[in-house]
Structures are given as C-alpha cells and as structure tokens.
Image (cartoon, coloured by chain):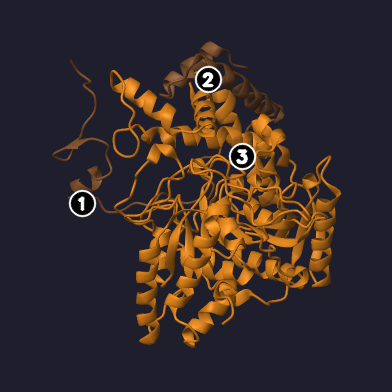
Chain colours: A orange, B brown
C-alpha cells in the first residue's frame, strides 16, 4: 500500500468514502510516523494515541452508515493554544503545568463535529510569542527542511512552528494554528506549506488562550491550497460565545478553486521593497507577479505609506494586551504555584518561575506602556497609527484593488540558536515585517509556497485581501500553486 | 524615552514578576532596545486621527439577561493548585 500519510486531505477524504482504507488505518499510519519522528522533530508535546484510535473507530462507523462529516476520519494536529477537554493545554508554557481544561474550544468542537480525528497537541512558542518556536517550554521544533548539503538544524518559524513542521513532515494531514503578527504565515513560508490567517472575527477565539485579543485569529496550516480551504470551512463559524465573531455565513471555499483570476486587480505595494532585502526574495516576488499577470490579472503598483510603522505599533499594542491577558496566571486558579511568604510574593514567585524570558519581556513592555504617565505617549499613539495603517488598505481597496501580493517573509528559515537573532529581540521581531500589517488592519492574509532559494529552502508569497473575502485569496493562491508546483522536504529523520 | 534599573524593578513589581538584580539589569537593556525601536512612531502626524478601538466595525453583541450557565463548581476548581470544598486556597491575606 502507498504511504497513507502522503495523501492530502482531499485525497484521503475520497479514499475514505470509497472505503479504500479505514479511518483507523489512516490514523495508525500517522501515529506510527509520529512515534518514529517526534524524538527528532519535536513537533508534538502530547500524542493522544488512545483518543485518536477511538475517534477513528467512530469515524469508520459513521462512514459505514453514510453519515460522514466534511472531515470524517482526517487526522489533525492541534496547536497547544486550543483548549481540548481533558487533554494537555498549556500554550507550551511552564505556568500552565498540568492544565487539562474541562471544556473544548469552539474551533476544535467544530472540527470534531465534522468528523476529524485528534492526533495530539502541537509545539509552539510560549503563549504564541516568538518567530522561531524557540521560546517553547518544551524546546525548539526542528524544521523538516535542511539546506542542500547541510546537516544544520533550522527553525520552522513561529509561533505555530509545531503545526508547520508536523504538516510538512507528514505527521498530520493538517493542523490548527493561530496568528497574532504572522504566526501562521511565517512558519508556513519556512516549511513549504499553505497557511491562512482569516479576517478578524471569521474564526471564534473562544477557548483559545489569549495573547493579544484584538489581533489573535486562528486558521489552518495545510499541505496545499485545497486542504487549507477545506479546513477553514470547518474551523470558521458564527459563535455567540465570542463577541467579536462576525455574523456572516461561512462559504464553501473549495468551490472557488480553479476559477480564473482574469480581470482581477492585484496591488504591488512599493513600501514592501525593503533596503537590503535578499535578491532571491525580490526575484520570487517578480515570479509571482508574472504568474498572476499570465493568468489574466491586472498588476498595479500601490502605496501603503504607513507600512514601516506597523511593526513598532504592534510592539506596543500586542504587549499591552498580553500584559493584561496574562495577568490571570497567578498560581491561584490553575497551573503552577510557587510558594511565597505572603500572597503577593506567591504571585511574583509563580510568575517568575512560570514564564519564559520572551513572555516576561513582553509583559514588562506592556505593563510599562500602559502605566500612569506613559499611556498617551505609547499606547494611544500606537492605536492612532493603527487607524492610519488600516486606512492605507481601505484606500487601495476603494480604488478597486482586489488583492495585494507581497513576499511572506524577508528570508528563508534560519538556524536554531542563531546568534544574530537571539542577541537582539528586535531582529527576531523583523521576521514579521510583511505579515504584521495584516493583523493590525484585521484583514485576511495567506502564505503560499512559491519556490526554493539557492540553498534549497522554501520561500512563500503572501496574498492580502479585503475583509471576509477569503475566497479571493484561495482563488489566486491556487493559481500561484498551479504555476509554482508543490514542495516537500527530503526525508532525513 | 528610556528606562533605568529602578523603573524596571517598579514595572516588575506592577507586573507581579519577581526579578533578581541580574534579571533587572539584563531587562533594562532589552527594554531600552525595544523602546528605542518604537520611538519612530513619534514621527507620524496623528493630528485629528481617532485611536482604533475595534478593527472590524460592528455593534457589540448582546444577549438576554438570563442565567444560561453555572453549577460547575467542580469544573472551575478542578485545575487549581490548592482547593478545599470548592474554594480556592491562597496564603493568608488579612491578619
């Protein structure tokens, strides 16, 4: 039999329906692959063998009785940020030691209701704060991709590094992920996978540990554009439990794949052409432009003048919201408790031991910018700049631009424990320079693999769309995918 | 603007994170790097610009004022480090 883990979700879906193999066989193939690889890749922090088998058996029963859901029997990995009832949910932080929620997040409930099977919980940067998956309490994830002729371990990106690595290494058919500044799109670009951050409000945040509530949005990481479309349809919903969930029905994203982009107006923002950007990134961008032009789209240069201020504004808004959201980890209601002589010392000791360096850094920045006397200078100024960033996009969309094409990241994957990145927090933050504007404006953004660099490492292009027009993103991403082909790492693990 | 070590210790106290002198010293450098980076926002002319309060224009959802949930004390305390009879236990607060 062919390797079942190599099948896309769409392929597995039709073969499960025609009973070519059972859901249990498919799940066993993934569990075997995980058990063989996870010691090296470290993509999973918990593998739920028994639960996966039970869910797969239930899927087989539904397949046999003709009651199959949209994701019936499809084995998925779940980022550790999503609450899963009775299963490890720690946002890969020490402070949530032992936390097993008594409830299920809306996103995972939606997936299980559609018949998906949970393989386990995926590694990530602690509380989704990082761009390399190195801030996880459970250690770094290793990118399944290596440069030509090199054994050096590379990062898979972050914060959804476990999700991207697991999808790329065939350790799940698809994965849930979240994106606050680029945490779906940057790891997808680093691993040759497809990732979409939907419009703010499209996917419920209920049961997802909060980092920066006005920016956080969940989405899938998948092997190809079709699989991402299939997964998003199941993940998205209108949810009364999330007050920011928007009351718009979820479309069938798959239905637009193959539709022509003829006559579509694609904007190329000149501010994304950075000084010192590698020539390979520029070349990739030009290739993407040519593919869409050849497919009949109209290419126009546009200007988003406040682009350079998005990252500094993000590093005020996101830490400010994080400092407030993470106040709940106090050693009283869940997770770690480190004793102290009184209650305040208990809080301080618990949080000192429970949070890692990057998380503490962001809580400190957030506490500082919100503190008396600094609020106007930092937080209010950043929120005003955010209005201007959003207005930049509104202006180009009002001028008739349907989509914006940019590189996804300023480089390919870098090494684990990279000296340059680790010595200066701002250098690490620059990874999100092309993706963060999208979160600041609440727009949908998708990263699609578009080629390999000279060292054989994947690079991605980003598409940015109008609010709630994810279908347009999938439509154009499919055109790029058809032209670029698909990319998978050579197995060394 | 930049911070000194005593400001860092004060902010750590506000954030309820215990810091050693070495931690505070290291954090001072890191925080100043980040504050230096965000300084460029002052270049932006924001005259007459409203601060963003909601990224998607939408009315706040409301529901009927009814009890729809509850009676889950066991679930609520299930993950707590110390409990007694469905209460959270903490070190003595009032003498």
Out of A128 and A198, give the one closest to the viewer. A128
Out of A296 and B25, give the one closest to the viewer. B25
Q: Is residue A310 left or right of residue A171?
A: right
Q: Is residue A293 left or right of residue A196?
A: right
Please give the chain letter of the residue carrying mark 3.
A
Task: From the top left corner, tell me how far across and down residue A228 is, in percent.
Answer: 58, 66
Whether callout 2 and callout 1 share a subunit is answered yes
In what element is the residue under mark 3? helix
The quadrant of the rendering that contains the N terminus of chain A is bottom right
Q: How many marks?
A: 3
The quadrant of the rendering that contains the C terminus of chain A is bottom right
Among the 4 quarters of the image, the one containing residue A163: bottom right
Q: Where does label 2 land, which residue?
A: B23
Task: From the top left corner, tell me how far across and down residue A4 is, in percent.
Answer: 55, 76
Q: Earlier in the sequence, mark 2 or mark 1?
A: 2
In what element is the residue under mark 2? helix
Query: Of the numbered discs in the image, which one, if any, rests on residue B67?
Result: 1
In what element is the residue under mark 1? loop
């Amino acid at each position: 039999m062919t390797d079942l883990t190599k099948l896309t979700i769409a392929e597995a879906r039709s073969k499960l329906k025609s009973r070519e193999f059972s859901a249990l066989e498919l799940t066993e193939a993934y569990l075997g692959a995980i058990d063989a690889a996870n010691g090296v890749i470290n993509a999973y922090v918990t593998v739920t063998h028994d639960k996966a088998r039970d869910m797969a058996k239930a899927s087989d029963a539904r397949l046999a009785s003709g009651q199959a859901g949209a994701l019936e029997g499809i084995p998925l990995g779940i980022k550790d940020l999503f609450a899963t009832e009775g299963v490890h949910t720690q946002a890969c932080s020490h402070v949530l030691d032992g936390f097993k929620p008594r409830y299920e997040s809306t996103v995972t409930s939606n997936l299980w209701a559609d018949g998906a099977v949970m393989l386990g919980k995926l590694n990530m940067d602690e509380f989704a704060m990082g761009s390399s998956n190195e801030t996880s309490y459970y250690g770094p994830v290793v990118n399944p991709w290596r440069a030509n002729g090199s054994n050096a371990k590379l990062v898979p990106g972050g914060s959804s590094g476990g999700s991207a690595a697991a999808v790329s290494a065939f350790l799940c058919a698809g994965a849930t992920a979240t994106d606050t500044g680029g945490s779906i799109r940057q790891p997808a670009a680093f691993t040759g996978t497809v990732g979409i951050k939907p419009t703010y409000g499209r996917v419920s945040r209920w049961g997802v540990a909060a980092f920066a509530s006005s920016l956080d949005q969940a989405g899938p990481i998948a092997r190809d554009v079709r699989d991402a479309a299939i997964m998003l349809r199941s993940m998205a919903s209108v949810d009364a439990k999330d007050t920011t969930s928007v009351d718009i029905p979820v479309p069938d994203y798959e239905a637009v794949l193959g539709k022509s982009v003829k006559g579509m107006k694609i904007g190329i923002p000149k501010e994304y052409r950075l000084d010192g950007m590698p020539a390979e990134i520029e070349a990739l961008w030009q290739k993407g432009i040519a593919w869409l032009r050849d497919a009949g789209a109209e290419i126009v240069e546009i200007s988003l003048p406040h682009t350079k201020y998005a990252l500094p504004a993000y590093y005020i808004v996101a830490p400010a919201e994080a400092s407030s959201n993470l106040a709940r980890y106090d050693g009283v209601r869940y997770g770690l408790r480190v004793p102290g002589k009184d209650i305040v010392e208990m809080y301080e000791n618990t949080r000192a031991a429970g949070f890692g360096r990057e998380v503490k850094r962001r809580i400190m920045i957030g506490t500082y910018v919100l503190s008396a006397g600094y609020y106007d200078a930092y937080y209010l100024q950043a929120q005003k700049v955010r209005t201007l960033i959003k207005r930049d996009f509104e202006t180009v969309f009002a001028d008739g631009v349907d989509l914006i094409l940019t590189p996804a990241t300023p480089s390919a994957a870098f090494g684990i424990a990279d000296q340059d990145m680790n010595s200066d927090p701002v250098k690490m933050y620059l990874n999100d320079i092309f993706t963060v504007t999208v979160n600041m404006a609440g727009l949908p953004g998708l990263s699609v693999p578009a080629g390999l660099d000279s060292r054989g490492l994947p690079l991605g292009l980003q598409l940015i769309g109008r609010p709630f027009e994810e279908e347009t993103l999938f439509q154009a991403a499919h055109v790029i995918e058809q032209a670029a082909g698909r990319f998978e790492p050579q197995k060394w693990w | 603007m930049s911070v000194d070590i005593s400001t860092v210790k004060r902010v750590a106290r506000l954030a309820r994170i215990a810091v050693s002198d070495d931690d505070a010293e290291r954090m001072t450098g890191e925080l100043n790097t980040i504050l230096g980076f965000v300084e460029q926002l002052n270049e932006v002319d924001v005259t007459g610009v409203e601060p963003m309060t909601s990224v998607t224009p939408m009315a706040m959802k409301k529901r009927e004022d009814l009890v729809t949930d509850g009676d889950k004390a066991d679930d609520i305390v299930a993950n707590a480090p110390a409990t007694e009879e469905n209460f959270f236990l903490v070190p003595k607060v009032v003498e």
